[in-house]
Image (cartoon, helix red, strand yellow):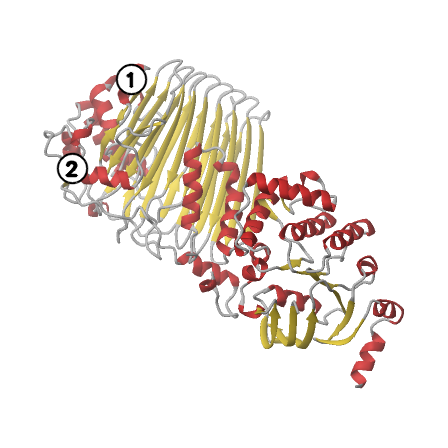
């Protein structure tokens, strides 16, 4: 602890900043070296056709891609978020990268059996603690490495219940009618710039289908890993919960330490039918980049779910600690009467990270309810923004929303911003918004230290106290992981 | 000797506040430090506790045979220096229980004792709650959040009881307290008095001292102790104020 001592002239905030900037503990930052097939950099129609051919896709999927690509070319990169970055050179990325497995033939690389997993890739997931061999009995895992899914566990067990849990590429092959029915229905290809890009070059993702009346007995999860440099990951995930079903779905993400920005532009579509419930949890730990956040992941994601049926419920919970820039608004379209949307978020930014994240709650059905709890933590020289929309349509008789946005500043060089947009078109609606901003102060730290508690323990105690409401919504193991991640992200010089 | 302060000089933002303070405290003694506003009372308390805003420019402080000024704040706390705050700080979302369990275990680690688990700590804390007549829900609440001024001070005294320090410094704990709260604080202090434990009670007012009855009373003025005496000095001050003492001192 004594190494944290600084000269008397430096203020405690500088000291905290120093502690924070010493964080080099991005332990997921290793690189896996294996034979890979990576497309040449560049984006054009030929590349899209090649991706589609690589995946052996049917015509309708290729058409979807081409339509999206044509539209994307008419769009301009959005820069309205409170995050600054140079316009990206989309020709400087590769849009397909996959570990080569000699065992499988051209086009069938979205493999399912364990024997064909590249040992280096398997090692990478083992190091990340992802049980891709099905060794964890409480969770089924879809492991995605760059552009493809390398393993999906527990599929047979789930299949007995009628649950489909596979990679998106496989779903296109094996369940084309389901994919066609839902693809682009919640997030249309023309929704926004990055959604259009994703629709054009979608790599892999997860496909989940829970049949009527089935409660998934285990959590389903996807682990996304970006490995190749200068590669984009554009996963497409679709989750469908039929009438009266339930599923808890988790996703985790990480990437190696690279010196150039990597692009992650995912689209997630969730469809929740009558009386069904979906709990969607994310622990995002993409590489944030170096001291100045150079080389981190640009996380431009469109996640949206629709509560299609009566009494349906969709709950988004996210713990965001990584990425150089985060642009992400998991949203709920509350169409069914009495449907419920929830958004619980902890976003931590440090160094020069920039996060612009929040949610949209679109109330259409009668007596729909939504809850938004957002906790933003800013440290270092970072900027952390909550941006949220609560929209009550004229049809949403008796709709209710409760929003709470709390920001905590750690140090004196970071920023916290809140942009709540509220549009109410039905007079019977009730919308509440509460916001607070606090600062981990010198006084709080001194108080803790005077009781014998070290500065690091004090910070993590205060931070965890602040995030408690959100962490309690995460599945237990995930909550623990999130707490640890926060501690690591805030870790300083304590040995 | 538990505490030996010699020629202590300290400044904040280039402004000299303590100008050569001397004080000796033996185990079990209760010392009161009084003085007009701006005399340096709170600075003295803060310097002993290790607040970094203050820079020590001269002098030495020996605590239990060790150089106190060499230690950082948490080390001092772990070795038995406790400061009851003039304005105890709020920590939202952190329960008093977690906060104090962490603190107590830090002190226990320093003493080479095994940490208390939740159950050990609960039992231990219950004893102290009963000893001090505190409300039983005290542990479940967030640290000082939504506490009245009196409750915050009581919580500080409760923390003091849990940490069992060697030296308790009360920095104007009595300011802003009504007579009932004052009595609770004073009773807490009296309950914790022992042959090994010493107190430095920094205050403006005589009221608290009437309950605590210190062994030694010092008047601090302009960064120095200008007069020391027994409990009778409290009443002398009550009748004549500080002016006589200050004039006497300035005349010297």
Residue B9: percent from left, percent from top: 63, 76
Nearest the viewer among A393 and A275 is A275
Of tags 1 and 2, the one toward the viewer is 1
Residue B31: which quarter of the image? Answer: bottom right
Crowd tier of the residue under label 2, counting other residues whose Cα lies within 10 Å: few below 14, some 14–19, many 20 or above: some
Comparing B100 with A425, the one in front is: B100
Residue A47 is marked as 2
Give the residue displayed 50% in from the left and 33% down from the top: A390
Q: Quadrant of the N terminus of chain B?
A: bottom right
Q: Quadrant of the rendered structure where residue A201 is?
A: top left
In the figure, A401 relative to B52: above or below?
Answer: above
Indicate the chain on which mark 2 is placed: A
* C-alpha span from label 1 to label 2: 35 Å
Q: Residue at x 54, y 28 (%)?
A: A425
Q: Looking at the rendered structure, which numbered label has been put on residue A159? A: 1
Determine crowd level at label 1: few under 14, some 14-19, many 20+ residues with C-alpha closer than 10 A.
few
Judged left or right of residue A284, residue B41 is: right
Residue drawn 67% across and 51% down?
Answer: B161
Quarter of the rendering occupied by the C terminus of chain B: bottom right
Locate residue A46, reporting x and y percent: 14, 36
Labels 1 and 2: the sequence-earlier one: 2
Q: Position of residue A45 (x, y in %)?
A: 16, 36
Considering every residue shown, the one lying at the far right of the view is B239
Q: Chain of mark 1?
A: A
Give the secondary structure at mark 2: helix
> Eyeballing the image, is A361 above or below A286?
above
Task: Describe the element under mark 1 as helix, strand or loop.
Answer: helix
């Amino acid at each position: 602890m004594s190494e944290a001592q600084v000269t008397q002239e430096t203020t405690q905030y500088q000291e905290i900043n120093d502690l924070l900037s010493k964080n080099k503990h991005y332990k997921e930052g290793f690189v896996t070296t294996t034979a890979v097939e990576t497309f040449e950099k560049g984006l054009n129609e030929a590349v899209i056709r090649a991706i589609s051919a690589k995946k052996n896709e049917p015509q309708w999927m290729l058409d979807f891609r081409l339509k999206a690509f044509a539209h994307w070319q008419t769009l301009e990169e959005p820069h309205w978020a409170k995050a600054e970055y140079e316009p990206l050179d989309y020709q400087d990325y590769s849009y397909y990268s996959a570990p080569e497995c000699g065992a499988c033939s051209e086009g069938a690389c979205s493999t399912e059996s364990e024997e064909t997993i590249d040992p280096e890739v398997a090692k990478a997931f083992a190091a990340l603690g992802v049980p891709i061999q099905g060794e964890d009995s409480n969770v089924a895992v879809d492991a995605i490495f760059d552009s493809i899914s390398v393993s999906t566990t527990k599929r047979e067990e789930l299949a007995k219940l009628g649950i489909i849990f596979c990679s998106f590429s496989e779903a296109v092959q094996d369940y084309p009618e389901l994919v066609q029915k839902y693809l682009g229905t919640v997030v249309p290809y023309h929704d926004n710039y990055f959604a259009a890009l994703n629709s054009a070059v979608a790599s892999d993702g997860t496909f989940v289908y829970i049949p009527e009346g089935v409660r998934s007995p285990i959590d389903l999860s996807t682990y996304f890993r970006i490995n190749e440099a200068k590669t984009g990951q554009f996963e497409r995930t679709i989750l469908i919960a039929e009438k009266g079903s339930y599923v808890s779905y988790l996703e985790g993400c990480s990437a190696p330490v690279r010196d150039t920005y990597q692009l992650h532009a995912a689209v997630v579509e969730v469809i929740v039918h009558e009386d069904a419930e979906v709990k969607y949890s994310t622990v995002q730990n993409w590489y944030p980049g170096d001291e100045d956040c150079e080389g981190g992941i640009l996380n431009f994601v469109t996640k949206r779910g629709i509560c299609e049926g009566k009494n349906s419920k969709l709950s988004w919970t996210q713990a965001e600690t990584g990425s150089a820039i985060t642009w992400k608004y998991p949203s709920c379209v509350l169409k069914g009467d009495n449907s419920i949307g929830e958004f619980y978020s902890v976003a931590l930014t440090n160094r020069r990270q920039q996060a612009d994240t929040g949610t949209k709650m679109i109330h259409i059905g009668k007596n729909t309810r939504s809850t938004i709890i957002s906790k933003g933590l800013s440290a270092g020289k970072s900027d952390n923004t909550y941006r949220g929309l609560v929209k009550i349509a004229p049809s949403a008789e008796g709709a209710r929303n409760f929003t709470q946005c709390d920001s905590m500043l750690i140090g004196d060089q970071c920023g916290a911003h809140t942009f709540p947009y509220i549009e109410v078109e039905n007079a019977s609606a009730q919308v509440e918004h509460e916001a607070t901003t606090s600062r981990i102060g010198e006084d709080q730290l001194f108080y803790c230290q005077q009781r014998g508690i070290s500065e690091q323990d004090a910070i993590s105690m205060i931070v965890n106290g602040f995030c408690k409401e959100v962490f309690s919504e995460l599945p237990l193991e995930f909550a623990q992981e999130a707490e640890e991640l926060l501690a690591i992200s805030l870790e300083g010089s304590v040995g | 000797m538990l505490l030996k302060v010699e020629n202590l000089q300290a400044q904040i933002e280039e402004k000299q506040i303590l100008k050569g303070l001397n004080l000796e405290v033996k185990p079990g003694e209760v010392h009161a430090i009084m003085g007009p506003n701006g005399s340096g009372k709170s600075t003295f308390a803060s310097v002993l506790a290790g607040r970094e805003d203050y820079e020590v420019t001269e002098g030495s402080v020996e605590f239990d045979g060790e150089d106190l000024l060499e230690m950082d704040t948490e080390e001092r706390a772990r070795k038995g220096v406790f400061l009851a705050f003039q304005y105890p700080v709020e920590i939202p979302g952190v329960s008093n229980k977690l906060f104090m369990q962490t603190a107590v275990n830090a002190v226990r680690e320093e003493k080479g004792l095994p940490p208390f688990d939740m159950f050990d700590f609960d039992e231990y804390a219950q004893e102290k709650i009963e000893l001090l007549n505190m409300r039983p829900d005290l542990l479940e609440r967030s640290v000082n959040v939504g506490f009245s001024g009196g409750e915050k001070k009581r919580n500080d005294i409760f923390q003091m009881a849990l940490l069992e320090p060697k030296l308790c410094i009360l920095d104007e704990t009595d300011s802003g307290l009504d007579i009932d709260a004052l009595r609770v604080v004073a009773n807490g202090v009296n309950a914790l008095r022992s042959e090994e434990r010493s107190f430095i009670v920094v205050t403006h007012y005589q009221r608290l001292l009437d309950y605590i009855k210190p062994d030694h009373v010092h008047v601090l003025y302009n960064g120095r102790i200008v007069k020391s005496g027994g409990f009778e000095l409290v009443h002398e001050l009550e009748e004549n104020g500080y002016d006589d003492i200050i004039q006497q001192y300035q005349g010297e």
